Image: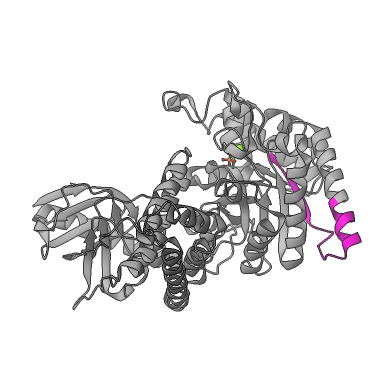
Amino acid sequence: MIRIYGKGASKGITEGTLYFFRRSEPLIEKKYAPDSEAELARFEAARQLAMQQLSALYHKVLEQVSEGTAALFEAYRMMLEDDDYIQTVRENIFTGICAEAAVQETYRTFERRFSLIDNDYMNARIADIKDVSDRVLRILCGVQPKEIVMEEPVILAAEDLSPSELAQLDPNCILGVVTAGGEMYSHTAILARTMGVPAIVRAGKRLTDLYEGKYVMMDGQTGELAIEPDGLTTRRLKKKQAKERAMKELMDRLKGKPDVTVDGQTMHVYCNISSPDDLDAVVANDGAGIGLFRSEFLYLQERTFPTEEQQFRAYRAVAERMNGKRVIIRTADIGADKQVGYFRLDKEPNPAMGMRAIRIGLSRPEIFKTQLRALYRASAYGKIAILFPMIASLWEVQEVKRQCKAVQAELTAEGIPFNPDTELGIMLETPAAVLMSDQLAREVDFFSVGTNDLTQFTLAIDRQSYTLARFFDAHHPSVLRMIHLAAENAHCAGIWLGICGELAADISLTETFLALGVDELSVSPPSVLPLRSAIRSTTIGEKRDQILKSLWNPTA
Ligand code: PEP
Ligand code: MG
């Protein structure tokens, strides 16, 4: 038996024959081309054909997988309409090189640009630009994309696999995917997760076609690939597989059931998302709403400020897809660990406590106003609520509300529809906000506790530090007491309180949160059903007093 470890990219245990995908690489024979106009025309024709192919792929994926996943190929098509991309190819051609070399050079320019951004999600976008550029390149070189023909379902192995290549496959013929390279956040990995196909990335050079045709077992969670597994490994993986299947059946039975305890206390379970791409997972896991849409993604993926129109389209799409369920969109939490070059923020020694989130909004009203206008416009298309991050003072909330009113007045004057009753909420991420929550509660419609930052600022421990990880205790009684205090103040003012930090998904605290009076928990989509299971099997009743006593009066 040979065992190879990569990175688990899509959960699930599977077994089958290993089949290697070999791509026909386009070969650029002649690099220099003096007739630039002719090369430009060749590029233009290839670009048009590539866009047609991507439209066809969009419709195929829409039919076979989902709308959210199909949207990727629409985004690819739009990449080919991007002025910057087209202009870079054009400029390259006019240096005297052929269209093929110009496309290749353009991809390299974008690759360099994106790899300078210190962000895994953005780095994974390099693969998307490569996928699009390769498509144009293959058309220019007259290379047919390799058809992957399988007689029986297989585990597909490859050096790397692009989203287009994966999407073209019949999901019924793919038992699993393992690649030598690849990224967790690549669209190939995202696609595998959406298709429910177990996947391993970064298996490394040991994954060679010497193993073609061998029987393998793989675990898409741990990243283990066992080639010709021995008895012990087979038994271990089969046992885990049976357990996962039983769990999945149990979870499927919970879909459509209310999030309510045995004794009737409701706890809404919403989802955290970072981009509209995550909506498929929300729907598949039956999230009751969106508790936190980190709108930063819109800013992180652009090289300049996203326009009001771009933002409006994204927010509207989420609101419409959630079909009347609450969608809480947080205004941009840029700064700290989410730096965006074009904001040109000064370098600070402590960016987590520096110019970030609402502080940028209040210091640069033109950026903030654009986002507020987009949010209010989108509010006409679903149940949008707006959430403001990193609030510390009452005046900040009052100023934010003043700006909301001003935006509403503007939209009214322009005859643009919006929902004037759009709920406004604030994040409780600073001890200051928690301690002022009695007054803050009178200003807003809801609170959402960001336990990641609240723990950081309460314990004075950098949430990013590996060396301090053992001191970073989100279960710390000070954090739990703060949640209780804020929940009491919220309820006194007649508003609700949720939690959207990582702690919300911690099932060992579900009973505690119910006892503290938390009304909503917002978690990543795969955590929804396990959390629902925990809520539905809890009877909080008499335990409440016990839990509160041990929190506030442990020695009595
Ligand atoms: C938090 O701080 O808990 C939170 C949800 O916000 P973020 O993790 O995006 O800072
Ligand atoms: Mg935060």
Can residue 482 be seen here?
yes
In the image: residue 200, left or right of residue 515: left
Q: Nearer the viewer, residue 246 or 453?
A: 453
The residue segment tinted magenta is 407-427
Residue appearing at x 18%, y 48% in the figure: 4
Q: Is residue 408 magenta?
A: yes
On-image quarter of the C terminus: top right
Determine which quarter of the picture holds residue 249.
Answer: bottom left
Can residue 556 be seen here?
no
- Residue 340: give x, y in percent of width and height: 58, 39
Question: Vertically, is 307 above or below 75?
Answer: above
- Residue 52: give x, y in percent of width and height: 46, 75
Q: Nearer the viewer, residue 482 or 387?
A: 387
- Residue 493: give x, y in percent of width and height: 82, 44
Determine which quarter of the picture holds residue 193.
Answer: bottom left
- Residue 323: give x, y in percent of width and height: 65, 70
Q: Is residue 259 magenta?
A: no
Residue appearing at x 42%, y 67% in the figure: 38
